[in-house]
Amino acid sequence: MSPHRPPEPVQVIKQRRDAALQALVSAVPYIGFLGLHFDRRGDELTAVMPFDEKLIGNPELPALHGGATAAFLEVTAVIGLAWAHYWPQFESGVLDPEAVAGGQLPRLPKTIGITVDYLRSGLPRDAYARAEVTRSGRRYASVRVEAWQDNRTRPIAQATAHFRMPLPPRDTPQGEGAA
Amino acid sequence: MDETQALEIARQFISSLPHARALGMSVVRIGPGRATFSMPYDERLIGDPETGVMSGGAVSALLDTTCGAAVMSHPEMAGLTATLDLRIDYMRPAVPGQALRAEAECTHVTRSVAFVRARALDDDDDNPVATAAGAFTFTKREDMA
C-alpha cells in the first residue's frame, strides 16, 4: 500500500482476482452440480445459473424448481459473502489464489437461516443473481440476494440470509480479520 | 384412496420433477397433508469441502419439495402448488455420509394459501438438521361440503 510503489500491471491484477474467485468457487462441489459460474467486474459478482433440464420442477409449465432457485440464492449469498470477506486478504497477498486452488481453502461462512420469497415463476432459461452484504460483523453477517432472468427489474426471487462467520485462524497476525 | 395408491401417485409426482430426480429424492411416506421424503448423501452436493457437509442449498431443495408434496397431498387440494415463501433455519451441519429425511405437514389451509412446517433429519431423530416454515399457493376444492 506504499504510495511510492507503481501500480501493478492490469493483467497481473485481473489474473490474481480471477484465480482467487475460481479457487473459491471450484472448491464447492454443489456449485458444479448446479452448473453455476460467476461473472466478476472489479469486486462485484453476478452469479449465472445456465438453464439445464435438471433444474426444472414442474415439467408441464415448465418452471424452475423452487429448491433450485433457493439453492441458487443461497450459494450466491455464501460466495458473495466469502468473496467480500476474503477480498482484502487476496488483494494484500495474505491469501494466495494458487495455494487456495491447491486445497488450502479459507473457511466458508455457515448459513444460520435463509428466507426465500418467490416472486415470479422461474422460466426455463438462464437466471442471474447478485448478493449484497447488508451487515458484516466479526461473528455474524447478513446478506440480501436477488435473482432475475430476462428483466433485471422483474426479480423471480429474493432472499435474506444470516451467516456465522468463520473464526479467523489463530496463528496468523491478521487474526482480527479484514472485516 | 388407500395408502399404497397415494404412495404410488407421490412416487410418480416426484419422479416427474427433474430437479428432485437429479438430487436422488425418494418418497418415504405420504398424506393426507403430510409427506416424508429422503435424499441420499452425495459428494456432488457438498457445500463445505473441508468437512464434506452437504450444501444448505440441497437441504433447501429437499425441504421445498417435501413441503410441496404435503400441500399436493392435502385432501382439499385441487390443482398444482408453487412456493410463495420458505424460511429455513439450519440448526447443525448434516453428518457427512448419512441420508437426509424431510418431514412436512400442512398446518393450515385457506382458499388460496397453504401453511407448511417441515424439518430435515439425518440419523439423529432428536436433533433436526434444519427446520422450515413456508407458505404455498393452494386451490381449495369447491365441491367440499
Image: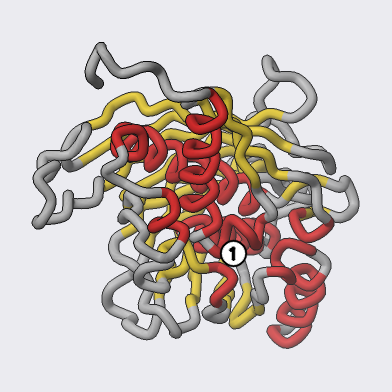
| Residue at figure coordinates x 86%, y 55% from the top left | A59
Q: Residue furthest top?
A: A3
Q: Is residue A87 above or below residue B125?
A: above
The spot of residue A50 in percent (x, y) is: 76, 45
The spot of residue B16 in percent (x, y) is: 83, 67
| Residue at figure coordinates x 42%, y 51% from the top left | B88
From where the camera sits, is residue B105 visible? Answer: no
Q: Amino acid at mark 1?
A: Thr
Identify the residue under disc 1. B66
Using the image, name the chain to which the residue with label 1 belongs: B
Q: Nearer the viewer, residue A105 or B39?
A: A105
Report which quarter residue A69 is drawn in: top right
The C terminus of chain A - image quarter: top left
- Mark 1, Cα crowd under 10 Å, few <14 / some 14-19 / many 20+, is many
| Residue at figure coordinates x 51%, y 60% from the top left | A28
Q: Nearer the viewer, residue B27 or B142?
A: B27
Report which quarter residue B28 is drawn in: bottom right
The N terminus of chain A - image quarter: top left
Q: Assign a secondary structure to mark 1.
A: helix
Q: Residue furthest right?
A: A60
Left or right of residue A170: residue B129: right
Q: Is residue A3 above or below residue A95?
A: above
Left or right of residue A153: residue B127: left
Q: Is residue A170 above or below residue A162?
A: below
